[in-house]
Structures are given as structure tokens and as C-alpha cells.
Amino acid sequence: MSSSAGTIALETGVPRGPQPSRINPYWVLVLPLVLFLVVLYLYPIGQVLWISFSDPEVGFQNYERLVTNRGILRMLGNTFRICFITTAISLLLGYLIAYAMAHVTERHRIWILMFVLVPFWVSVLARAFSWVVLLHDNGIINRALMDWGLTTEPVHLVRNELGVLIGMVHYMVPYAVLPLYANLRGIDPRLVSAARGLGAGPFESFWRVYLPLSLPGIAGAGLLVFILTLGFFVTPSILGGGKTLMIAEYVSVQILQTVRWGIGAMLAMVLLILVFLVFAVMSRVVDLRSMFGAK
Amino acid sequence: MTAKRFSQDCVEIALANLKAGRISRRSFLAASAFAGAGAVALSSGDLLAAGKPKQIVHANWGGDAVRCTGDIYGKAFTAKTGIPVVVDGSGPLEGSIKAQVDAKNVTWDCCDSDFFSVLRLGRAHEAEPVDYSIVDRNGYMAPYTHDYGVLGYWYSYTMTWDTEKLGKKAPTWADFFDVDKIPGKRTLFKYMNGALEAALLADGVPPEKIYPLDVDRALAKIEKIKDHIVFWDSGAASQQMFLDGEVVMGSLWQTRSQLIKQDTKGRVDWTFDQGNACPAGWVIPRGNPAGNEWGNRWLAHLQTPELQVEAMRCFGQGPANPKSYDIMSAEERAITPGTPENLKKQIPLDSEYFSAHYDDVLNAFLDMISA
């Protein structure tokens, strides 16, 4: 997953405050890190960029495929649809969990946190295979459904897009919960009490006071989840029954199997640019620094 | 790329076999006994002529293939030449070989590769030429003596089916594509090989006219029953689907089919009939560290029939040197894809065709299944 891309974008996408005119001597301490980034990060990315314009010959032909090749367009469309749905469901579930965590006793909070974090530490491969075992046509869930007479035929829960969504949401919920929880904890409960005191019902005080206050948390969690889902490879590959092809796997096929590096590099660049774009748009909507707790 | 995946799969099989106690360490000990026999293949006078390299690095897919290749081929080579053999299991994907050669930083002397990839690498000048004064041309069946690589082993995509659901008689590919006649999920390889050939056979194309592939016709045929197909991308996954009863039939690597047959005590059966036999190659990346001559000596060593049979017993790799078939038991011949009698039942994959069209056809296939 391209979490490193996210970190970089954070560093560069944030508008700096007014700088002192004299160079701060502390920059010397940061210099090795900057060099490190240039050598190990920017230089290879520059090479990938170059390949995307030069393989098999110099020109824009790889980028032309973005608009002319229906297969690539459809694959990108699938990727975005799946990532949007995953993000939306993860945010909804994550919000419910984070809301509960922010409002229960300390002891219960620790339990909830544990249930959120334990799957977080299990390998993505093991989780994907476990879902297959649970969900396939002769799996535990389908057998239970049929034994209880709820269905007469197996429900196809996996080896399709539904399976991919289940696996991806399961993977992403902790990523939604943690930033949301940090945000919800910061909301002053007296504001809700005040709204109630002024005559708002429970729903209205949530809708008009609590929810707007938690918007930065929702935006931050959504951004994090969406960007991480763009790089998914293993989960769709296993749970999709081979029929769900997302951008990361497509790039891998072009680089390693069909050896069409130009197309692979072009798509990798497109992915990177999209991540930057998402950040740029978000930075106009919300304050990124406060969203990630840097302020 | 499928041979690479296939070899990777053999590794897993060997591991599973060892754990289940189906193979013993004896196979590996036997390798040292062949060291003497192998020495005949190279005359000792030649050895002194060329400067000895520090080592030979053979690239394959990790795990037990490292041990099997090292113990069987490697020890015998070291015994007769004194040169250590290192088996690198990090995976010589075609893209990885190209990356090393282009960067002029080659670390492998020999790579395990699909035969159509060997042709592609040769055409792109990413491979060293084969020296047939060192490598025995008679150790291969025609037409697999190529300028830039040799036939390493055979593997096959075979019809595998659940006898409890479909009966003892093997279904045909026509049955596979007839979902009204036989309901239930089927499985095909996600990266295409074996699938288009099966579709065309089912559509009535005679075996000798399969290549050049009528890609559109094959894709249309598969698309019609796409909802009934699960695509596997690892041998373990294909095996699991049959053990769980998730699918009723499919196109599987013969090594996995045989394993499932053993594990289910014959509930799942398989046949070479209408299978897709695939040649895999060994190739020397251009600018290999040990140099062209020693790369070729290693290729010559890999041809040794006795060692090929041992490798088959260790991790299922189907020997390709015709002489190795003479020293197998009847049971071993029956499950070896490359023997003349088994090749006759199958459609041998056309490496020339795929060396020219693999990219386009694979992308069209992936496009169709993910649409």
C-alpha cells in the first residue's frame, strides 16, 4: 500500500506559515533526511516518470492509452468505485465504533480498542483466506443460512465484488476508527449538553452540533482510508475470484508478466498524481494540519 | 509467466509432501550417488581450460525448490567441478530478468522460465546464446533447441473433476462450457494459460487447428459462462476449491491434480486428455556472472536424465529429456506430461505463438474477466 506517498504529500502539501528571512540553523539537522528522500524517493520516482514517457519509445503514447484503451479505463473505473464504496462503509462503521469508544467507560474502551486492533495485526493474506473459508458457497455462513431455512440456495458472498468489499472494509475499519476517535475525544461534551438544554432533541443535537464538529475527523479518516484502498492488491485478488482487477495488480502484471513497463509506469504515475490531487482538494476543504493532529 | 508460477507451486507441493510424509529424505541422499554418473557428461580436460567461476547461481522460486535443486543438481555439479552452486529462490520473473540485464547488474547464471518467455528474452537480446557444443542437442525433443534457451521441463493444465458430482467418466471441455447440462462452479487459471485452448476445443476447433488462437472466439466462449467460473491464481487455491467442494471441475496443473486425487482418495480425478502441455525453459541472462561457457556447462548438467527424474520425485517437476522417461516406473510415466504417449493426448502450447502475442492476449483476457 502506498502509505509512504501519503506521508510525503503531507509534508509538501501543507502551506507553511511565515518563515524567518534568515535560514534557521536547525535545518542542518534536517538536511540528511532531505538528502535521503531525494536519493531514495525522488530519484527513483523520476526514473519511473521517465519510463512512462520513453518505453517503448519517447512520446505520450502510454498516456494516450488512458483515454483510448477501454480495458484500462474500465479497470480504473472499477478501482475507484470499489475504493469509494469501501471508504464510505468503513467510515460509517468506523464512526459508530469511534463514537462508542468516546462515550463508554475506560474499561469498555480498552476492550473495544483491543477488538479493533487485534485484526489490524493479522496478516492481510491470512485474513483474506479466512474470509474465503467463511463465505464461500459451501462455507460456514452459507451452510448455516440453509440449515436455518433462510435460503434454499447458496448466496454468493465471495469470489465476486461483494467479497472484495467485505475483505477491504474489514481491513480498513481500524484505519477509520483511530483518527475518528482522536477527533471525537476532542469534542467538548458540554456543547451537546448545551444544545439539549436549549431544547434540541437527541437527533437534532447530534446532527447540528456533534456531527459538524466531527467533520475534520471524518475527512481525515476518509482521506487516509481512500488513499490506502487505492493500493490494494492481495485482498481483491483472493476474494474477487480473479474477476476483480484493481490498479495495483494491473501495474504488477504490466511490469512483471507482459513486460510493458511503459504502461505500468504510466499507471503508477497516474496513481501518484491522483493521491496528490486528493490531498490538494482536501487541503482546500479542511485544515490538514489540525486534521492529523499537527496543530 | 506461468512456468514460473508453476515451479513456485512445485515448491509448495514438495513442502506439503514432506510434511505429510509422502516423500523421504532418501531422494536427496540419492543425489550424491549420481555425482559419479554425472561426471561422465563433462570431460575433465575441458574443465581445466576455462577459468573457474567462484560459483553458479541458479534462480528459481524459493522454499523446497531451493533444497531440491541444490541437493540434486547442485551437489552433483560441485562434486564433479568443485564449483559451489547457489540456488536463489527470489523468483526470476521476466520483468526482473530484464531489469537486471538492462542495469548491467546480473546476479543469476540460470533462470527458470516459460519457453515462450525464453524466446522473448532471446529476441530482446536479454539472454546468452546456448552453446550446443557443450549442451547435448539430442537431450531435447524438436523443436525445443533454441538459440537462447533450452527446454527445462514440462507441466500441464489438465481437466480435473469431482467424481461424486460428475461420475467416473472424464468430462470434456464441451461439458465444461455447458452449464445447463452440468451445473456448478468451474475453475480456470487467472492468467489465461490453458483457458483459451479449452474454450476453442469446446467450440469444436480441431486440436491441430488451435494455434494460432482465434482469441475473439475463445474469449466470447468464456464470457458466456463467466458467472459460473472462479479463477485461481495459486496452486494451493485451486486445490482448496476442490477439497471444499466449491467447484465441480476445472483446469489445473497436473501436479496439483495428482495431489488432490491422493488427498481425496480418488474422489477428485484428472486426465491428460485434452490437456494443455506447456514447455518451460532454462535461460542464461545476458552478462551472467559466471560467463557464457560456465552457464552452458550448468545447462548441460541440468540435462542429466537421472537428475531430472530425481527432481521430479522431489518436487514434481516433469522431466523433459527423453532419456529420463526410460528410467521411470510405469506409474511415474503415467503422471509425466512430456512422455510421447501423454503428449499425444494433449495440445502442446505453441511457444512461438505466445512469444509474439502473450502481452496482447493476456491483457484482452484480463479485460474480459474483469469487465
Image: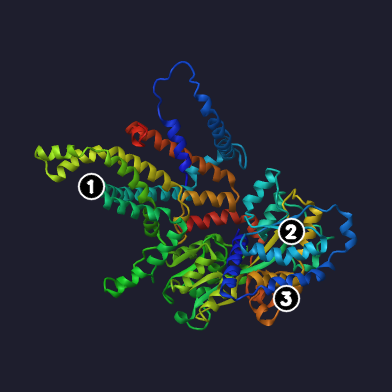
Tell me the CA gap for discs 1 and 3.
Answer: 73 Å
User: Of circles 1 and 2, which is in front?
Assistant: 1
Q: Residue furthest right?
A: B45
Instruction: Using the image, determine if residue B243 lies above or below residue B119.
Output: below
| Chain letter behind tag 3 | B
Tell me the CA gap for discs 2 and 3.
Answer: 26 Å
Disc 1: CA contacts within 10 A as few (<14), some (14-19) or many (>=20): few
Residue type highlighted by circle 1: His
Q: Which residue is mark 3?
A: B325
Tell me the CA gap for discs 1 and 2.
Answer: 63 Å
Instruction: Using the image, determine if residue A26 lies above or below residue B171.
Output: above
Left or right: B73 with respect to B370? right
Q: Secondary structure at mark 1?
A: helix
Can residue A154 be seen here? The reply is no
Q: Secondary structure at mark 3?
A: helix
Q: Quadrant of the C terminus of chain B?
A: bottom left
Q: Which residue is mark 1?
A: A103
Disc 2: CA contacts within 10 A as few (<14), some (14-19) or many (>=20): many
Disc 3: CA contacts within 10 A as few (<14), some (14-19) or many (>=20): many
Instruction: Using the image, determine if residue B125 lies above or below residue B60.
Output: above
Residue found 43% across the figure and 17% down from its top: A20
Q: Which residue is mark 2?
A: B85
Q: x%, y% of residue B234?
A: 53, 63
Say whether mark 2 and mark 1 are on the same chain.
Answer: no
Q: Nearer the viewer, residue B86 or A212?
A: B86
Residue type highlighted by circle 3: Tyr
Residue found 34% across the figure and 40% down from its top: A220
Left or right: B364 with respect to B30? left
Q: x%, y% of residue A1?
A: 47, 47
Q: Nearer the viewer, residue A90 or B180?
A: A90
